[in-house]
Image (spheres, helix red, strand yellow):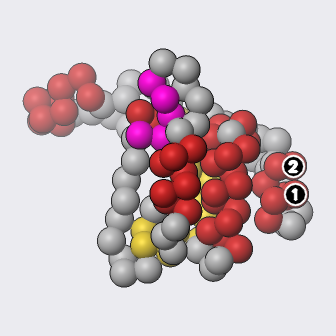
Amino acid sequence: LTNEHAASTVLSETQIYYPKSWDVDMKTIRRLEKGDYQAVIMDDTSFIREPDLTAFAMKQFNKGASVVIVGLEGIFDLSTLNRQFKVNWKCAGYSSRSIELNYLGKQILGDAFPSDHHYVM
């Protein structure tokens, strides 16, 4: 989240969801709803499968915030996005990319570098 004064609020999954049940923490959502944001960034699974988070993002969108949906899970069915944002997007394709880790990068990043391929729309 980026508020109107360009300060960022970054929340991890454990700050949005209850750790044991993985239900959305509505106290946190209600607290966040009091703010005005320039942007809301969330992953595609949260937007599609979590109605409370979708409602929060759409409230911010309706107040003028940009909403960015990051395609982490590769959900290619855009019907939810089309319905929510009143658009008619179609998935034209996707591609893969490969990033190689060199010796210096391995020293710096250790095992933190993702070894799996990621798909990009």
Residue 71 visible here? no
Residue 32 versus residue 15 in the image, above or below: below
Give the magenta part as a residue range.
15-19
54 lies left or right of 25: right
Residue 117 visible here? yes
Q: Position of residue 67 (x, y in %)?
A: 61, 64
74 lies left or right of 86: left
> Crowding at label 2, few (<14), some or many (≥20) Cα neighbours within 10 Å?
some
> Crowding at label 1, few (<14), some or many (≥20) Cα neighbours within 10 Å?
few
Q: Position of residue 84 (x, y in %)?
A: 81, 59
Residue drawn at (48%, 41%) of the image: 16
- The amino acid beneath tag 1 is Arg
Q: Are marks 2 and 1 in contact (CB under 8 Å)?
A: yes
Residue 34 versus residue 43 in the image, above or below: below
Q: Nearer the viewer, residue 18 or 11?
A: 18
- The amino acid beneath tag 2 is Ser
Question: Which residue is disc 2 drawn over?
Answer: 79
Question: Which residue is disc 1 drawn over?
Answer: 83
Q: At numbered mark 2, what does the secondary structure look like: helix, strand or loop?
A: helix
Q: Decide whether the magenta segment is chiefly helix, strand or loop.
A: loop
Q: Position of residue 100 (x, y in %)?
A: 33, 34
Which quarter of the figure has residue 58? Answer: bottom right
